[in-house]
Image (cartoon, grey):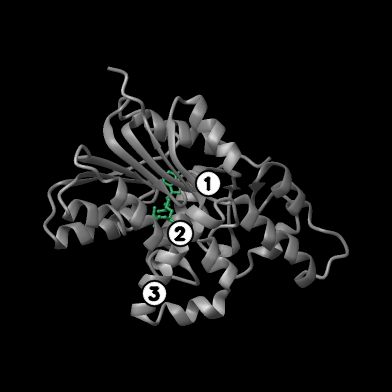
Amino acid sequence: MVNTDYEHEKNWWNAKAVKEEIDMGDEQINRALRWREINKNLTSDITSVLEVGAATGAFSVPLAKRGYQVVHFDISDEMISIAKEKADKLKLDNISFQQGNSIDLSMYGDNSFDMVINMDGAVSFCGVDAEKAIKETIRVAGKKVIMTVSNRGNMLISLVKAVSWLKTDKFLPAAYSMLNDGLWHTYQFSENAKLVKGCTNDYLGPIKAFTLNELRSIFEVEGMRIDRLTSIGSLSNHCGKEFVDWIIKDTKLFDEFVEICDRYDKEICSDSIGSAQRAGIIIVASKPDKT
Ligand SMILES: C[S@@+](CC[C@H](N)C(=O)[O-])C[C@H]1O[C@@H](n2cnc3c(N)ncnc32)[C@H](O)[C@@H]1O
């Protein structure tokens, strides 16, 4: 498998920073679903929050605005500078910024933050190192972890369907790699480069996509109690792009649809494909109090 080159990753994320909050497809729905889960878990005993892979501050800045003591952590200095500008405009003095790599949070001690949020990137885009990033996130969390990671089921759909638009007579080796271990990288197989034409710098990855069971076992081995582990945003993906493009324009129906999506993930189909665009598995876990 291809190793993760973090200097390359940092430059790639830097190039993506200006586009980070331009939502495509069902991204807005996925973000709304994540906010619901975060708000539900912001109980009165939570005062400090570390957000790993916090990008341009879509979550970290509003949380600081609400009075939480926030550390915004990201590999990309361009993402950080956009977030910092937002915080400066709001004159927030309860948010600090740290550039670094999610696989090494050694600047923070065990249990340093009440809540650690790590969503949509700083795990799955570590590729072969994804498990290290999960363990570091868990280590520095005192009470709660909220994490989203890529959903192997959703990734597999694109890779299986690629056979028709690449007009190959065999399913791609990448489809089998996704099926077997959830690992994908632009440089993994020669055909992969064709799949990312048009992406930023014609590049994507490394990616580690998970199954629910895989994620569950990592959290359990680390001694965490799992409060929620489901796919997230599956209904919007099943409804298709045309429907989603329509519903996000209608503010009144949008909120009701998000509510239905949330219930679908929790009550109807909790192990499904997740969102089309953003990370499609969510885990919420608590660290048992050892005192
Ligand atoms: C798609 S954005 C997600 C932003 C935000 N967490 C959200 O959910 O909207 C992914 C972010 O993770 C950051 N990231 C990717 N790999 C990282 C790593 N190894 N360490 C820290 N940050 C990383 C990227 O720079 C980017 O800002």
SS assignment at label 1 = helix
- Amino acid at the residue labelled 3: Phe
Residue 65 got which mark? none
What residue sits right under mark 3 in the picture? 254
Q: Residue at x 50, y 76 (%)?
A: 244
Q: Dots 2 and 3: beta carbons under 8 Å?
A: no
Q: Residue at x 31, y 23 (%)?
A: 289
Drawn side of residue 216 relative to residue 19, left or right: right
Q: Nearer the viewer, residue 153 or 123?
A: 153
Tell me how far mark 2 sits from mark 3, CA to CA: 14 Å
Name the residue tied to disc 2: 263
Earlier in the chain: of badge 2 and badge 3, it is 3
- Mark 1–mark 3 Cα distance, whole angstroms, equals 28 Å
- Residue that carries the numbered disc 1 in the rendered image: 124
Foreground mark, 2 or 3?
Answer: 2
Do we see residue 159 in this rendering?
A: yes
